[in-house]
Amino acid sequence: MRRQRAFTLVELLVVFAILGFLVALVAPLGVRQVEKARAQEQWLVLERTVEGLAFRAFAEGREASLEANGTQLDWHLGDEPPRTLVLDRLFFDPPQVVQIDAHGLARPAALELRQDGRPRSLTLNGWLEGD
C-alpha cells in the first residue's frame, strides 16, 4: 500500500510563523509609505489651491485673502463667499493671514506649516516666476 505524502501540523505552523514574522516586518513600512503619499497629496492640493487663488486674483483683478489656522485654510476672493480646505496631515503653525493683491502677489510670500512634525514652507509667489 502506498502512503500519501502530506504536510504535518508542525511544518504548517513553522511556515505560518515565518509568514507572520515577515508580514510583521514589512507591514509598518507599507503603512508609513501610504501615510507619506497621503501627506504629499495634501501638500499638492494646498499648493494648487493657493496658486489657483493667486492666479484668479490676477486674472480677475480682485484681491483675495487666506487665513491658515491649525489644519484649516479659509480663503475668499473679492466678494465671493469664503471657502474652506481642511487638511488632516498638514498643520499651520503659527496661525497666519495672507493678502493677495489684484496683481496676484501674496504678502507674506510664504506659509509656514508642519508636516509629520517637521517644518515646511510653501512659497506663494512661485507661479509668477514660472516655477
Image: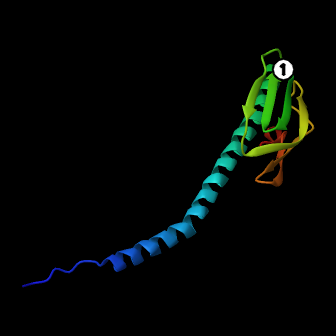
Write the residue at 87% across / 22% down: 63
Front one among 7 and 94: 7
**Above or below, 104 relative to 81:** below
Write the residue at 78% across / 39% down: 71
Q: Name the residue under label 1.
A: 61
Horizontally, residue 89 falls left or right of residue 21, namely right
Front one among 31 and 112: 31
- Looking at the rendered image, the quarter that the C terminus falls into is top right
Residue 61, given in percent of the width and then of the height, sits at 84, 20
Residue 62, given in percent of the width and then of the height, sits at 84, 20
Q: Is residue 104 visible?
A: no
Question: Judging from the image, what secondary structure is the residue with disc 1 in?
Answer: loop
- Figure quadrant of residue 26: bottom right
User: Can you name the residue that lies furthest to the top here?
Assistant: 79
- Looking at the rendered image, the quarter that the N terminus falls into is bottom left
Q: How is the image coloured?
A: rainbow
User: Can you name the residue that lies furthest to the right here?
Assistant: 108
Residue 54, given in percent of the width and then of the height, sits at 80, 31
Residue 88, given in percent of the width and then of the height, sits at 72, 42
**Above or below, 27 relative to 115:** below
